[in-house]
Image (cartoon, rainbow, N blue to C red):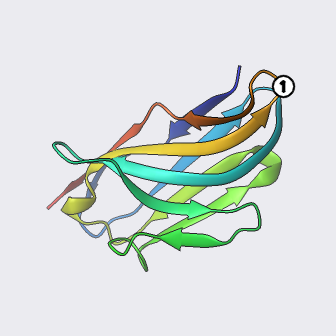
């Protein structure tokens, strides 16, 4: 059974930093693009950043220059380094990945979410 497990969320003051991690476990053949989404209360889930297998990256305008997405293919892990955090970054952050596994072939997987709270 493939799972995505996130860690690294928490409470931080505005201007501070956090690093999120998301590790995929299970019998995995390959992982395509990996993404971070977030959802604030009362708002739709939005794409924050994504990274391809060749480490090409894209960012939402609201986080470009402050957040950095990276991945460690040997560890099946994606990271989100968040600097200069703002109160409006407060949300539940979810990782997402398209994974080819022995159990389901290619399938879309989501982590359970990790809360990030930025105080002003």
Who is closer to the viewer here, 47 or 75? 47
Q: Name the residue: 54% across, 71% down.
A: 58
Q: Picture coordinates of residue 74 (x, y %)?
A: 83, 49
Above or below for 72 versus 104: below
Q: Residue furthest bottom?
A: 65
Q: Quadrant of residue 106?
A: top right
Q: Picture coordinates of residue 52 (x, y %)?
A: 68, 62
Is residue 36 visible to the viewer in this orientation of the structure? yes
Who is closer to the viewer here, 44 or 86? 44
Q: Name the residue: 34% across, 72% down.
A: 84
Q: Quadrant of residue 54?
A: bottom right
Quarter of the figure with the C terminus? bottom left
Q: Name the residue: 56% across, 61% down.
A: 50
Residue for badge 1: 102
Above or below for 26 versus 64: above
Who is closer to the viewer here, 63 or 13? 63
Q: Picture coordinates of residue 1 (x, y %)?
A: 71, 19
Q: Name the residue: 49% across, 53% down.
A: 36
Label 1 secondary element: loop
């Amino acid at each position: 059974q493939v799972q995505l497990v996130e860690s690294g969320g928490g409470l931080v003051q505005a201007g501070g930093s956090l690093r999120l991690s998301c590790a995929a476990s299970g019998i995995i053949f390959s992982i395509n693009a990996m993404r971070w989404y977030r959802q604030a209360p009362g708002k739709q889930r939005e794409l924050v950043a994504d990274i391809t297998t060749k480490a090409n990256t894209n960012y939402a305008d609201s986080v470009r220059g402050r957040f950095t997405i990276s991945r460690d293919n040997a560890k099946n892990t994606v990271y989100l380094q968040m600097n200069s955090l703002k109160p409006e970054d407060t949300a539940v952050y979810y990782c997402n990945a398209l994974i080819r596994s022995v159990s389901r072939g290619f399938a879309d997987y989501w982590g359970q979410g990790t809360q990030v709270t930025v105080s002003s």
